[in-house]
Amino acid sequence: MITVRKLLSFEFSKFGQFMKSLDEESLKMYFGMATSKDYIDSLMSKVNSNKLMHDFIIAEDEDLNIVGVLHLATITEDKMEIAIAVSPHRRKQGIADKMMTMALTICQNKNKNGIFMHCLSWNKPIVNLVTKYGLKVERDGTDADAYVKLPPAALDSYFKEMLLYNQNLFQRNLNFGTHFLRELSSY
Ligand SMILES: CC(C)(COP(=O)(O)OP(=O)(O)OC[C@H]1O[C@@H](n2cnc3c(N)ncnc32)[C@H](O)[C@@H]1OP(=O)(O)O)[C@@H](O)C(=O)NCCC(=O)NCCS
């Protein structure tokens, strides 16, 4: 089963590695333009120079391979920008759903209530995804911006984050154990 978690700051390079593994079309959809590996390196340099402004949520498969990433970048004290990508071979399996749920819960609990996403207006999967999470999409030619104002942190949102964290940790430990036994039995 797929699990989601936040990357620790010393693991941020995993995001760059995942992005570099994506095909050209996915990168174009993610960044809104054709993108090179050098561009991803320069993005990672910016991230590493100010790690406190960034959070990454990743989705891992049963063998702990990364199959999706969500970048949360702080724009202002109470505003975050989201960008998301899932491996092409793992799409339409609810992976973006899992990452969005965790991301929005984390934002709400940090009182970063203004959520923003930039995307291509013809990118139906992302437009549908963000609309599902209450973001209002405003189109301007080929570009589109999506916004939502989250409610303030509350007891139930803190409880939801704790539950998500524990469920994913439990399942990840199971995945890790199963993966370890499988590796062992292959020797
Ligand atoms: C957009 C993207 C992240 C969706 O990931 P995913 O894991 O396939 O999405 P999920 O399976 O979790 O689906 C969640 C919702 O997204 C929407 N969606 C996903 N794929 C869709 C598709 N092919 N067509 C229409 N809607 C789609 C639906 O609303 C879906 O909810 P539903 O299943 O209840 O209808 C993925 O297509 C992707 O990585 N695209 C390339 C990168 C990109 O475009 N990023 C956006 C700019 S930052």
Image (cartoon, rainbow, N blue to C red):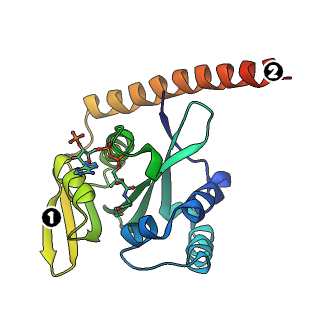
The span from disc 2 to disc 1 (Cα, nearest Å) is 49 Å
Residue at disc 2, secondary structure: helix
State the image coordinates of residue 124 (x, y, percent, origin top left).
Answer: 22, 60
For disc 1, does the CB lie below 8 Å from ligand 1? no
Q: Look at label 2 and name its amino acid.
A: Leu
Question: What is the number of the mark on residue 137?
Answer: 1
Q: Is residue 54 left or right of residue 123?
A: right
Binning the other alpha carbons within 10 Å of mark 2 as few (below 14), some (14 to 19) or many (20 upward) gives: few
The foreground one among 131 and 81 is 131
Residue at disc 1, secondary structure: strand
Q: Look at label 1 and name its amino acid.
A: Val
The foreground one among 15 and 67 is 67
Instruction: Reply above or below: 151 against 64.
Output: below
Q: Residue at x 27, y 57 (%)?
A: 126
Q: Residue at x 18, y 47 (%)?
A: 132
The residue pinned by badge 2 equals 184
State the image coordinates of residue 74 (x, y, percent, origin top left).
Answer: 40, 65
Q: Is residue 172 left or right of residue 126?
A: right
Q: Quadrant of residue 20?
A: bottom right
